[in-house]
Every structure is written in C-alpha cells, then in structure tokens.
Image (cartoon, helix red, strand yellow):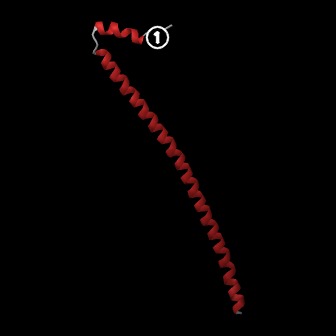
Amino acid sequence: MLSRLLSYITGPLAVAGLVASLGLLAWVNALKADKAALEVKNAALAATVAACEARQSDITEHEDRSDEIDMLGPDDLRDRAFEWVLPF
C-alpha cells in the first residue's frame, strides 16, 4: 500500500517537475532572445546618435566657415577666391 502511494505521488511530481523545468528553460530562452533583440536595437540607436553627432559637427563647421567668409572684405574675397576655384 505504501509503495503504491509513493509511486502515485512521485510519478505525477516527477512529471510536474519536468514540465516546470521545461517551462523555466523556455522562459530563459525567451529572455535571451529579448536581450539579443534589445542589443541590436541599442547598436542601431548608437549608430544613429553617432550619425547625428557627425551631422551636427558638419553643420557647426559649415556655419563657422560661413561666418569667416562673411567677415571678409571685398579685397580679401578676391584674394581668397583662387583657393575656392577647382582646377579644370
């Protein structure tokens, strides 16, 4: 009687433990997949931020050069014009 009761208890408990372990394993794998997806999104956002920073740097440099040119007088502009002409 006791052995029959023990086998009844251990059988379903073993199956329940196996099912719980498989569920936990599936949950951990889902978390790993989510982490990998977030790492990809993070890398994409980092690249976007780097591109924005480079663009802002280009804009600032262009504005600085435009300000330098705006402050030149007509004679200085004639002298500097040869620097801007591309050779054919």
Q: Residue type at mark 1?
A: Leu
In the picture, measured across the screen, residue 45 lies left or right of residue 72, that is right
Q: Looking at the rendering, which quadrant does residue 6 occupy?
A: bottom right
In the displayed structure, would residue 83 be above or below residue 51?
Answer: above
At 62% from the left edge and 62% from the top edge, which residue is drawn?
26
User: Could you tell me residue 13's position as x and y percent?
Assistant: 65, 78
Disc 1, SS: loop
Front in this rendered view, residue 54 or 17? 54
Q: Specify the quadrant of the image occupied by residue 5.
A: bottom right
Q: Is residue 42 left or right of residue 13?
A: left
Q: How many marks?
A: 1
Q: Residues within 10 Å of mark 1 (few under 14, many from 20)?
A: few
Quadrant for residue 80, please give it: top left
On the image, the x and y values in percent for residue 29 come to: 60, 59
- Please state the horizontal and vertical placement of residue 56, each as a whole percent of the image: 39, 30
Q: Is residue 37 above or below residue 29?
A: above
Front-lying residue, 8 or 84? 84
Identify which residue is drawn at 27% across, 15% down: 71
Task: Look at the image and tell me in which quarter the N terminus lies.
Answer: bottom right
Give the residue displayed 54% in from the left and 53% down from the top. 35
The residue to which callout 1 is attached is 86
